Amino acid sequence: MKKIVTWTIAIGLSLAFVLIPLPASDLFIRIYFDEVAGKSCVLYYATEEQDFLSEERCLISDIDYGQNCVEFRLDGSLDGHITDVRLDWPAQEQLLCVKTITVSSGGVIQKEYNPCTFFAEENIQLSNETSVTLVHPRGRAYLSTGADDPYQILSRALTAQIQGHYSHFRGSRLLICLFVAGSYFFAKKKIFT
């Protein structure tokens, strides 16, 4: 009877440890290029409370030519509150080649998007000075941009999908519980002695 009570308490504490909500970790959106020119890209976002895009809610990120990528960091406090996302490309005439898009949180890549899927017609709500050519066999998206404020506004469905990748560390906490349980089991069985 004592063992049953002990196991019940241990399982209850483990479930509480895994299921207690923790603040979300920051979300990183990285866009990797095969070809790109310009200094920086900008990500604008709107929230439920301020449902419009403005300079107050924008992230400016310089292009890292060492890795050929641009990175945007969305604060964990925005989890579940972002309604719209707009990507602004460098304001110059060029043909960008996007290789891949990754979304990470909690130090783990949560999702890697094929650019042909990410920039598909149904995932782009509005474009300005930007046209897209998808090359499915190579898994590349070519974006032809103009010099007059080129940008794309993502669909609300894609925006919701992206922000669904905020990490709350539930998987990590579950692994910790399994490690402790496994350690206890092996200690009791004394298989190493």
Image (tube, grey):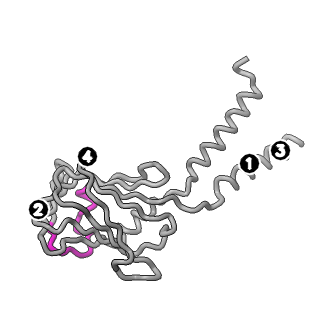
Nearest to the eye among marks 2 and 1: give it. 2
Earlier sequence position, callout 4 versus callout 2:
4
Labelled pair 1, 4 in contact (Cβ < 8 Å): no
Q: Amino acid at mark 3?
A: Thr
The residue shown at (14%, 73%) is: 129
Residue that numbered label 3 is attached to: 6
Residue 47 is labelled as none
Earlier sequence position, callout 1 versus callout 4:
1
* Crowding at mark 1 (Cα within 10 Å: few <14, some 14-19, many 20+): some
Residue 164, above or below 183: below
Labelled pair 3, 1 in contact (Cβ < 8 Å): no
Earlier sequence position, callout 4 versus callout 3:
3
Q: CA distance from mark 4 to mark 3?
A: 55 Å
Q: Residue 69: where, in percent of width, then height? A: 27, 53
What span is in magenta? 115-131
Q: CA distance from mark 4 to mark 2?
A: 20 Å
Earlier sequence position, callout 3 versus callout 1:
3
Quadrant of image for the N terminus: top right
Labelled pair 4, 3 in contact (Cβ < 8 Å): no
Q: Secondary structure at mark 4?
A: loop
Q: Secondary structure at mark 2?
A: strand
Nearest to the eye among marks 4 and 2: give it. 4
Q: Residue 90: where, in percent of width, then height? A: 19, 65
Residue that numbered label 2 is attached to: 94
The residue shown at (35%, 53%) is: 102
Q: Secondary structure at mark 3?
A: helix
Q: Secondary structure at mark 1?
A: helix
Q: Nearer the viewer, residue 25 or 125?
A: 25
Whether residue 25 sits left or right of residue 160 in the image: it is: right
